[in-house]
Amino acid sequence: MPAFLQPKAPFAADAIVVGDPGRALLLAQELLEQPKMCNHARGLWGYSGTTADGPELTIQSTGVGAPSAAAVLADLAELGVRRAVRVGTATGLDGGSRPGDLLLVAEAEATEGSASAFGLRGGEAVTADAELLERLARELADEARIGRIVSVDTVPGPATVAAGAVGADMQTVAVLARGRALGMATAALLVVTETADAAPLDGEPLEEAAKRAGRAAAAALSP
């Protein structure tokens, strides 16, 4: 049995994973036909259903930070999930992004801390699944920047230091590294919510950007 999730409905082989339970509900309402809650244990809301095009899809929240994401991913693998795309948020670092932009993660760099649990040292990077990355890039065309991000254990701010990184978040290293260890194909698509020189993205604009990312992720996961 899974360690943390308590399935109330079947999980699909393909999943979108998000940190925020509220975002899981938002994307379930946006992407699924008659979504059914498949988990509510520990406040990690998850939903399963079919998309408008027919494929089955699960949308599962992972909570805050790398350890929580890694634990949920392990449960998802046990429940039959084979591909997952993280739809999350990031801080823009290099001045090339504005709040509301999308970052498609080619690779995620680890920092000291929880990444050691995934076999990574600070400065080492883990790559997204090549096929999922290609599918997402094709689906998004010029709507997203492709680049390297850095994952940290505390809330990233615009001052986060990472040479060459376009953004920073708290979960992508965990999702990519844990997915690789579990034999699960994983990728990440992030919404920029803040930069050093712009007001943070919030409310309806953030929801609309998350929906845009969710639609792209669902399309990339389609057969």
Image: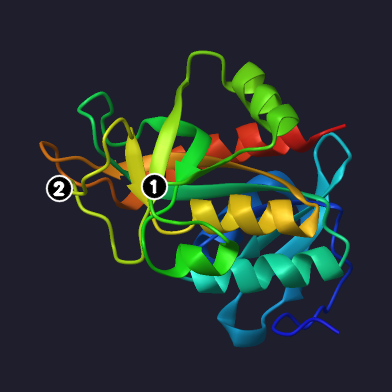
The amino acid on which the numbered mark 2 sits, given as a three-letter code, is Ala
Instruction: Give the label on residue 123, or none.
Output: 1
Q: Which residue is mark 2?
A: 159
The quadrant of the rendering that contains the N terminus is: bottom right
Tally the numbered discs.
2
Horizontal side of 29 relative to 105 (left or right) equals right
The amino acid on which the numbered mark 1 sits, given as a three-letter code, is Gly
Q: Which residue is drawn at the image coordinates 39% and 68% (left, top)?
A: 113
The picture places residue 216, in percent across and down from the top left corner, at: 62, 32
Q: Which residue is drawn at the image coordinates 70% and 25% (left, top)?
A: 135
Q: Which residue is drawn at the image coordinates 34% and 46% (left, top)?
A: 168
Say above or below: 39 vs 203. below
CA gap, disc 2 to disc 1? 17 Å
The picture places residue 43, in percent across and down from the top left corner, at: 57, 81
Q: Quadrant of residue 179?
A: bottom right
Q: Quadrant of residue 182?
A: bottom right
Q: Which residue is drawn at the image coordinates 80% and 64% (left, top)?
A: 77
In this view of the protein, can residue 155 be seen by the observer? yes
The picture places residue 154, in percent across and down from the top left corner, at: 30, 66
In this view of the protein, can residue 45 be seen by the observer? no
Residue sitting at the far left: 197
Q: Mark 2: which secondary structure?
A: loop
Q: Quadrant of residue 178?
A: bottom right
Closest to the camera, between mark 2 and mark 1, is 1
Question: Closer to the camera, 194 or 8?
Answer: 194
Classify 10 Å Cα crowding around label 1: few (below 14), some (14-19), many (20 and above): few
Q: Mark 1: which secondary structure?
A: loop
